[in-house]
Amino acid sequence: MRIVIQRVAEAAVSVGDRQVSAIGPGLMVLVGVEQADTLADVEWLAAKTAALRIFDDDEGVMNRSVADVGGEVLAVSQFTLTAGTRKGNRPSYIRAAGHDLAVPLYEAYCERVGQLLARPVQRGVFGAHMRVSLVNDGPVTIIIDSRLRE
């Protein structure tokens, strides 16, 4: 599983002309699920998301987590994070999980982050063509791959 975490002042997701979710200050998380991913990947990434210290403390040092600052989280599934780009110029998505695996793991990630933060995680619409808007705060953008945890 791969996630891209962005510290945001605000973020929103729209499908067509309808806004389906929005947050204020917090984290915008793009979530890519691969065929080999399991609930262990979900648990590890959810814990990282909730505890990652990328918010400023009183001295201006990134020393607080989204939990510490009471921030919100918006998670959007994005299969393109699984892209292989070694050969040629057209990305390969052969490692991307199909719906039968990707949907439950994405939902489990959202649920687990919500449990750790004691507040619901806002979501995109799995498989839909979405328009994601955000104001990156910093900018701060972190990429985490669960395959690299050991």
Image (spheres, rainbow, N blue to C red):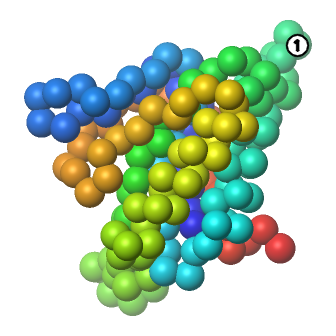
Q: Position of residue 23 (x, y in %)?
A: 46, 22
Q: Secondary structure at mark 1?
A: loop
Quadrant housing the C terminus: bottom right
Per the image, the residue denoted by label 1 is 59
Q: Amino acid at mark 1?
A: Glu
Mark 1 burial class by Cα count in 10 Å: few <14, some 14-19, many 20+: few
Tell me which corner region of the image, top left, top right, bottom left or bottom right, holds residue 38.
bottom right
Which residue: 69% across, 31% down?
Answer: 117
Residue sitting farthest toward the top: 58
**Vertical side of 136 occupied by 69: above or below:** above
From the viewer's side, name the closer residue of 43 and 45: 43
Question: Seen in the image, is 32 located left or right of residue 6?
Answer: left
Which residue: 52% across, 34% down?
Answer: 121
Q: Position of residue 99 (x, y in %)?
A: 34, 70
The answer to whether any part of residue 110 appears in the image is yes
Residue sitting farthest toward the left: 17
Residue sitting farthest toward the bottom: 87
Question: Seen in the image, is 82 located left or right of residue 128?
Answer: right
From the viewer's side, name the closer residue of 137 and 124: 124
Which residue: 64% across, 42% down?
Answer: 113
Question: Seen in the image, is 63 located left or right of residue 29?
Answer: right
